[in-house]
Structures are given as C-alpha cells and as structure tokens.
Image: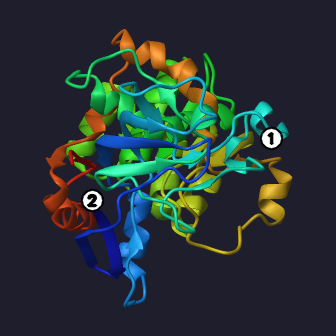
Amino acid sequence: MRATLMYGAGDVRVETVSDPEIQQPTDAILRVLRACICGSDLWPYGSMPASDEGSRMGHEFLGVVEETGSEVASLRRGDLVVAPFVWSDNTCEFCQEGLQTSCLHGGLWAADGNDGGQGEAVRVPQADGTLVKLPVGEDSALLPSLLSLSDVFCTGHHCAVTAGVNAGTAVTVVGDGAVGLSAVLAAKRLGAERIILMGRHMDRTDLGRDFGATDVVPERGEEGIERVRDLTGGHGTHTVLECVGTLPALEMSLGAVRAGGTVSRVGAPQYAEVPLGFPEFMKNITLTGGVAPARAYIEELLPDVLEGRIEPGRVFDRSVDLDGVPDGYRAMADREALKVLVQP
C-alpha cells in the first residue's frame, strides 16, 4: 500500500510500504477513507533531523473495517469507524477513569512500528476498545466533522472541560488554529457566555465568530493581555484555553486569566519550564490540561455531529489525495491552509 513518511524537516514523501496484516487476535485492518494533517505534525515538519529511514505519519483517521482478528467481538467487515488518535483497550483502570491516553495496553499511531493514518490502510491494535462505529455511509457529507472526533474537536473539548467551562463562564481562547477554533466551538457548546478569541488571521477568526466567539483580539504579548483585560473590566476571564503550545502563548494565557481562574493547555508544549512564580501563586491560578483522551469523549459528542447541531469539520479548508499530502504540509506550514483533509 501507499503511505506518508517524513524523512526530515520539510521532506515528506508518499511511498509504497508493506500492507498491514493481523498480528494479534485483537487487531483489525482498516481501509482509510479520510485522514488529515495535524498542527502537531508541523513541529517535526519544521525541525526534524534528516534521516535515511522515514517515519510514518498521521494519527487522525476514519475508515472501513476490512478484516478482524479472532478475538474482536464488536466489529465486523464493512463497519465504518473512527479511530481516536491514541489506541487503547478501553477496559484497563486508566481507561475506566476516562484517561485512555494512559492505557496500560495502548499506544500511538505511527510510532514503535505501528501504522500511521496518512495512508491507504492501518492495522488497529485493541480494535474493540479503540474504534467507534459510525451510523453513516461511506459517502456521507458528515465525514469531515466525524473525522474531527479523532482528535481536533475532542482536543478543543478537552481543553474547555478541564478548564471548567460552563454556562456563564467567560473564556479566552489563545490561538486561531484548528484546535483553537475547536475550543471556541466546544466552549460555546458548553454554554460559555463570552468567548474572546486571540488570533490575527481574519479568515480563521471569522470562522471563530461563526463558532461562537463574541470578541476577537489580534494583539499579542502584553498588548494582547491588556486588550483582554480592557474587555473584562480589568480582571481577565475565568478560563483561558491555550491551544498553541509555545511559551509566549502560555505567558499570554497566564496574563489574561482572572484571579482564581484556570488556564488549560492542550497545545503540544514546545517548552520545558512553566512560568508559575510568585505573582501566579498570589492569584491562585490553576494550570491544567494535557493530551486529550479523545476516546472518552466521542460517544458524548457524536450525537451533536450526527444531528447537525455542531459542524466541527468546517476547520478543514483544503482537501488533497494521497499524492497531495506533501503539498498539504507545505500549505499548512505556510499558513495557506488551516487544516488539510486527506482522501486516500
């Protein structure tokens, strides 16, 4: 089959690799219908050292079950399913606590010899626990929004949930990428009263307004913090959703949060230390967040997607086939595309 590999910064190739095969009785083989490029894929795209051996890519995908191992009980050939971006058995003690990203028997796509989602097919370990069946056909117009449940919308939702967003909450969202826009939509879904989106790309912030943002702040740094405080009577917002992963984004988040408030971070952190000193201590600021256990949220969010109450798939603004994946990376890195959908 054909799949995407990265050989170094800026070097993405689509090559022929071995077809996936059942290796364990709990495996399934999935034919990929839709995948996408994640903002977190851009970090290695910008900095990965060159290598003679490419690394498989992709952790967001949905598709059709083609084959199952002898112990797979809940799935059969022909089922349309979505795969969370971390596979898990969904039965261990951490999974039962809603933390499938720490599953005792789980793992990551495109790592440790596992297939990546940016290809024609994937071997799915722990298929019963990982895959969620979707009650639509292969040609459904809902596929982009259903794909968002693999990672990006669940990540925005996780950010809002861990921050404690609810009815009446004032929220600041830092970042107008796909995760930030998903966090706006998630905060609106949870009843947030006011949502301030910090972003400076008008096409993205316009979508953010459609998703529920009440205000847009294009300024950054201290100027951005002051603007948020001006909009909130000088206090800042109860919650701040940090959806970028850089230190300046975290510093803005800590500056924009209200005393006694919560900052949740879901942007993959590109820093080693967190600036939580005495000023933050005196303000009783809570810092939370982390990698989103998408599998814990899919069943909760699925009905709203199926019934059209939310349309998180609008974050996809470009579609490519498998041959177009390298240019899809370039387009996202150059800010020509928000999030690229892949149709193998």
- Residue 303 or 79: which is nearer the viewer? 79
Which residue occupies the foreground of this view, 154 or 92?
Answer: 92
Query: Where does label 1 land, which residue?
Result: 94
Q: Position of residue 279 (x, y in %)?
A: 79, 60
**Residue at figure coordinates x 28%, y 51% from the top left:** 120
Q: Residues within 10 Å of mark 1 (few under 14, many from 20)?
A: some
Where residue 343 sits, quadrant-wise, is top left
Q: Residue at x 66, y 46 (%)?
A: 263
- As drawn, the residue found furthest toward the front would be 70
Q: Amino acid at mark 2?
A: Met
- The residue at 62%/50% (across/down) is 291
Whichever of callouts 2 and 1 sits on the residue coming sooner in the sequence is 2
Frontmost residue, 319 versus 221: 319
What residue type is disc 1 on? Answer: Phe
- For disc 2, the marked residue is 1
Q: Percent x, y for residue 206?
A: 24, 36
- Pair 2/1: label in front: 2
